[in-house]
Image (cartoon, rainbow, N blue to C red):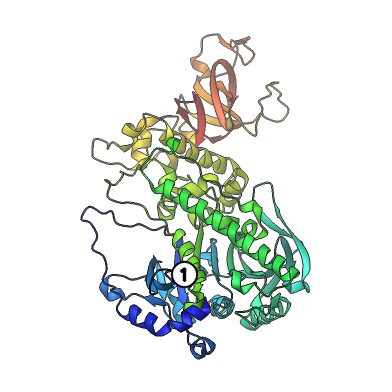
Amino acid sequence: MDRFYLENAAQYRNMVQAFNTTPVPRPKESASETTSPEMIVSARIRPLLDEDIAAGFPCAVYPRSAQIGEAGVVDIHDLYNHPRGRPILKSFKYKVDRLFNSQATTEEIYEDAVEHLVPFAWNGGIGTFFAYGQTGSSKTFTVSHLEKLVTASLMDGSLEGQREMYMTIIDLAGNSAYDLLSSRKPISILEDSFGVTQLAGVTEHPVKDRDEVMDLIERAASFRRTAPTLKNDASSRSHGICRIRIRNPATGSDGLLYLVDLAGSEAARDVAVHGADRMREAREINMSLSVLKDCIRGKVESDAIALSDMPKSKQKKPRVPFRQSALTKVLKHVFDPTGRRACKTVVIACVNPSLADVSPSKNTLRYAEMLRVLVPTSTAPKESNPMAPMAWTNAQVKAWISRNSGVPPIDSAVLAPTESGAQLLRLPAVNFERRCLKTPGVSTQQAKAFRSKLWQMHVDSQRAGDKSNTTQSNSNGSTDPDTILSRLVSSSRDSNPTASEIPFKDRIRPSMVVSWNEQPGHDSKIDIPGDIKLATILCPVAAVQETAKGAFEQALDLTGRDTSNGTQYLCALITPGQTPDSYELNLWRQIIIDVSMMENEVILEYDAGTRYYYMSV
């Protein structure tokens, strides 16, 4: 094929010059394109090498001009050897989010596409950058320079707050993994009980300055597996992954930054001169890249479902086979549709511009296009539901936490530094409560109650028939979640908004719910499971005639009891329900509680769907 290209190079140049790059007019009713904000797909066109120019191969990759409204569009022209006539030109058009031509510097690529990952990971998110393409397409050159720029941004003091940084660099060859900072020691890639990928046996190196980071990168490069190929004298024969863990000592949260240099894929002619071992190696590389592409497909389908108007029950759940290779296990957070943490990804497809490499270049850009989520936006926009936490952005989550987390208010920057509403709901209960307790003065009871309140809103927003109730405005036209919530639930909260400023023992009233404990030396033999004992106040003991019904349904004789000081109240017990964090009111099980036994006021809200009470704040 190379000989055919060379023999017709002059004719090829003439046909390319005559190619009409005028954009095709779009139909008037064509839907505009929306891409996923969490994934930026870009392409870098490598300059023609001296050997390509010397051999006579022309350029086959041509980016279109942004001035004609074709930003991110690239044309690839192939020469087709027609069996019944003269060679013909076949052109293919691809589009990415960011396109960097052969004159673009790595610094420009960093500033335009990659730099935003650094503060994102600094504040607790997971930022991932990976480059892929044919062997010899400058992937390692691009990644190594970007590593230096990332290091400079992390260490120059421009980011707010103090962080601790730890670096890990591993090498993936087939399904085997090695620690490049420990003389290529074998490690294992496992999943923990939460489904999070862990690198068992890897060494994390704490880093404090730029020189230390660069020394580790150079040390890892010396252990990286490389070998000469037809296209590259030092081709990467494995996937190199640099992970920087950024720990915030103030909150105990971690941010992660992944820089991935994928092994170069090889075409059939590239492996023609390989021996058995090299053929097996090439097969493993191409197989892992094929699994990566399958995971990409699954992610794209999942994002399209999330952004479409079709009912989710009628859509088939996509399959993401990330367990089929070590590479996709490590990068699971990029593809997992149910990921619990905020994640942003930048992909750079590195392309060889030579006509000799036109086929692998088309494959590279074809799969780059697959990462872009295109969703029609011609339909009427959906009205957002202010009571649906699944639809909240991080800014809305933080605002809601600040207004609704009780006294003292839970620090929203600690509880949800980067999480959206959907990601906060997926956060395990232990982690949720642990983050809440980092705010001074917040108790375990308040943390549990606040999580219960968030989940109650989520459950209410998912119920059939609630849509009309939750989206309608109040009498003043307000759709504020707090206003709507007050109409949907029955609460033990005091109707006076300023009542919380007064100590609860000075404003005891019927229906108030309190937590209580027995006085030392007094044992009522009431054993209630759970962390706290709750009761709702019915009335002062002085208002009760002679007897009441006790906790064991026995008669309580109140005759002869001294009620002159007015510190004792007849209360109904509140016991745990059948579902987690739920409670039920037992009006027929009563107990006498002295004010000295009461500890705190507790807010309970009734959920009609489950017929249980839940703690609120």
Please report the residue visible at 46 percent of the width from the left and 48 percent of the height from the top.
Answer: 421
Q: Position of residue 84 (x, y in %)?
A: 40, 69
Q: Nearer the viewer, residue 153 or 34?
A: 34
Question: How many marks do you count on the picture?
Answer: 1
* Residue 124 seen in the figure: yes
Residue 461: quadrant of the picture: top left
- What residue is disc 1 on? 116
Residue 170: quadrant of the picture: bottom right
Q: Position of residue 422 (x, y in %)?
A: 48, 47
| Residue 73 vertical placement versus 318 (above, below) | below
Looking at this view, name the residue that lies furthest to the front: 84
| Residue 53 vertical placement versus 617 (above, below) | below
* SS class, disc 1: loop
Q: Nearer the viewer, residue 443 or 74?
A: 74
Q: Nearer the viewer, residue 68 or 570?
A: 68
Question: What's under tag 1, amino acid-wise?
Answer: His
Looking at this view, name the residue that lies furthest to the left: 28
Residue 596: quadrant of the picture: top right
